Amino acid sequence: DTGVSQNPRHKITKRGQNVTFRCDPISEHNRLYWYRQTLGQGPEFLTYFQNEAQLEKSRLLSDRFSAERPKGSFSTLEIQRTEQGDSAMYLCASSSGLAWDEQFFGPGTRLTVL
Amino acid sequence: AQSVTQLDSQVPVFEEAPVELRCNYSSSVSVYLFWYVQYPNQGLQLLLKYLSGSTLVKSINGFEAEFNKSQTSFHLRKPSVHISDTAEYFCAVSGLLGGTSYGKLTFGQGTILTVHP
């Protein structure tokens, strides 16, 4: 068990470009979550998957954001036509889906939109 | 829906002094409660959690938190802090439905604890 991994760790892009982040959860964890954290704030929930099904999306998630979890393993988060306001740390977490639902977090991907 | 308020954005304290980081929440349903810690340049780590049973929960490194349902609080305490406790601490809640978590965590804004020698 190597923990939750995220790639890339840092991404700098120009406004209007598309970016994609990847998250590899702890193996056999069937729940996967995406959060966004801006400076001075706690993480905010974006979306989560139970296996390959996307069960909930935050109203914060505009149409420019899309997430997938094919085959219920790794997940990708894509942001289209990035804006400066998208600059943030994007966190991924996974859990076993048991009732007590402890979430394990990855190191995050820091996105800077110029 | 749930919300979490951490009443102090920054708490400076001297080494070996006691500390309390305050957390209040609101929710229309029962909740699980968590404290996460983020050390400089590291990811979020679970510090302790309240699920049910005894309202006082403890971590392996000397922190404790008490669930107070009537006050909707889950304050974090440590009787004697070390330099290594310097970090940002986040209180979080997860709503329950039928005893099972909804899944998503709602976090507070975070409290930066700085321990001075």
Image (tube, coloured by chain):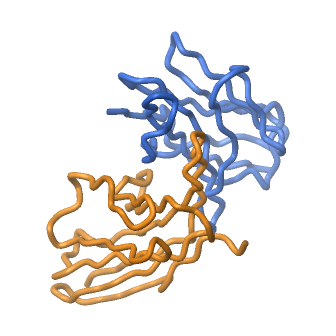
What residue is at 27 percent from the left and 53 percent from the top?
A58
Q: Residue at x 55, y 51 (%)?
A: A97
Name the quadrant containing residue A14: bottom left
Q: Which chain is orange?
A: A
Position above or below: B102 against B69: below
User: Which chain does blue denote in the image?
Assistant: B
Q: Is residue B41 visible?
A: no
Mark yes or no: residue A94 visible.
yes
> Would you place residue B74 above or below residue A95 in this image?
above
Residue A2, position as x, y percentages in the image: 70, 75
Which quadrant of the figure contains the N terminus of chain B? top left
Horizontal and vertical percent for residue A27? 62, 71
Percent of width and height locating residue B72: 49, 19
Q: Is residue A6 left or right of residue B19?
A: left
Could you say which is closer to the camera, residue B52 or residue A38?
B52
| Residue at (83% x, 39% y) in the render | B62
Q: Is residue A59 above or below residue A14?
A: above
Front-lying residue, B20 or B37:
B37
Q: Is residue B103 left or right of residue A64?
A: right
